[in-house]
Amino acid sequence: MSRLRADLLLLLAALIWGTAFVAQKAGLGGLGPLTFIGGRFAMSALLLAPLVLREAASAARLRRRDWLLAAAISAVMCAGASIQQFGLITTTVTNAGFITTLYIGFVPFVAWAILRTRIRPMVLVAVVLSLLGAWMLARHGQAADGQAAPLALGDLLILVSALMYALHIVLVSLFLRAVHRPFFLAFAQYGITALIAGSISVATEPASWTTVGAALPAMLYTGLLSGGIGYTLQIVAQRYTPATEAALIMSLESVFAAVAGALLLGERLTLPAALGCGLILSGVVMIEVIPALSRRRASTMDSPDPPIGTVPLD
């Protein structure tokens, strides 16, 4: 596969993930957040089941610590996805898309806490810019009538979910460094998330066949496209695209979320919120592009990074 084709696959994944915020928002019409999460991830697990079986036929055997790490990753995925879904109740698709992008800034700090990797000074500057942008976006957000929306609890929940996704990325990198079983890991985290969220929803979120049927299209989109296909495109393409470039391309999901929110839900950005989006994207560029260009100048080698996560950990 050529680098251009791999980059286009990552761009397609970002498009799927960005527009999935609209589907997640639509799925909340009459269905509880945990019920939606349970159904969505159950579909993702079913879609990946054949790939897991094919991978297991020729892959290395999993050790006990691999199973434990996979369980921890699944729990973090469940927490992040559930918190994000609850956040979408009281925030907009545009806010959710851009605030979620902050996971790129959180990853170096999570990696430092777990792996004791060094944090570059540029990362500190980029994170400050991104957090300022997130505050401007949340404080001066948008509504369908174009008026500024007040700061919502959902914005804070989306921020917490971004931190959970950063932890998820670091743990995934640890797993794939130890054993290259990406489809198993995807299947495990989807299945466990569906089991946990679904079990809790049965006791806390009564649902009828009518509400489930109304949310089914959104559940199918997020479960099959966002979870199953989007993730598969990512891990296939990252064999040919360096992780730094891949992360930058995938961060465009925030832009696609804003466009989808405007076209499908009538959301609009106020000027301060638009400036906040610009600050978030600036932070992403500082973290991803500038170090990548520096490394490229320092080395003439052009070998792709291994697919150990969506962003570099150093």
Image (spheres, grey):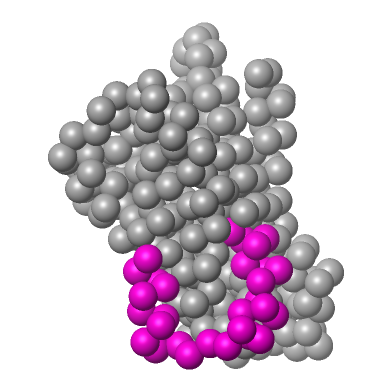
Which stretch appears magenta?
195-223
Q: Quadrant of residue 2?
A: top right
Is residue 281 found left or right of 81 in the rendered image? right
In this view, the residue in front, 302 or 272, is 302
Q: Nearer the viewer, residue 195 or 300?
A: 195
Please check the rendered image and state whether residue 209 is part of the magenta-colored stretch, yes or no. Answer: yes
Residue 226 percent across, percent down from the top left: 61, 54
Residue 172 image point, x, y percent: 35, 43
Q: Residue at x 44, y 37 (%)?
A: 52
Magenta highlight on residue 57: no
Residue 127, image quadrant: bottom left
Residue 305 image position (x, y, % from top left)? 46, 24
Q: Is residue 230 above or below residue 9?
A: below
Residue 198 appears in the picture as rendered: yes
Quadrant of the drawing holding the C terminus: top left
Which residue is depicted at the point 36% across and 75% down?
A: 199
Residue 11 horizontal side relative to residue 295, left or right: right
Side (left or right) of 199 relative to 115: right
Find the residue positioned furthest to the left.
64
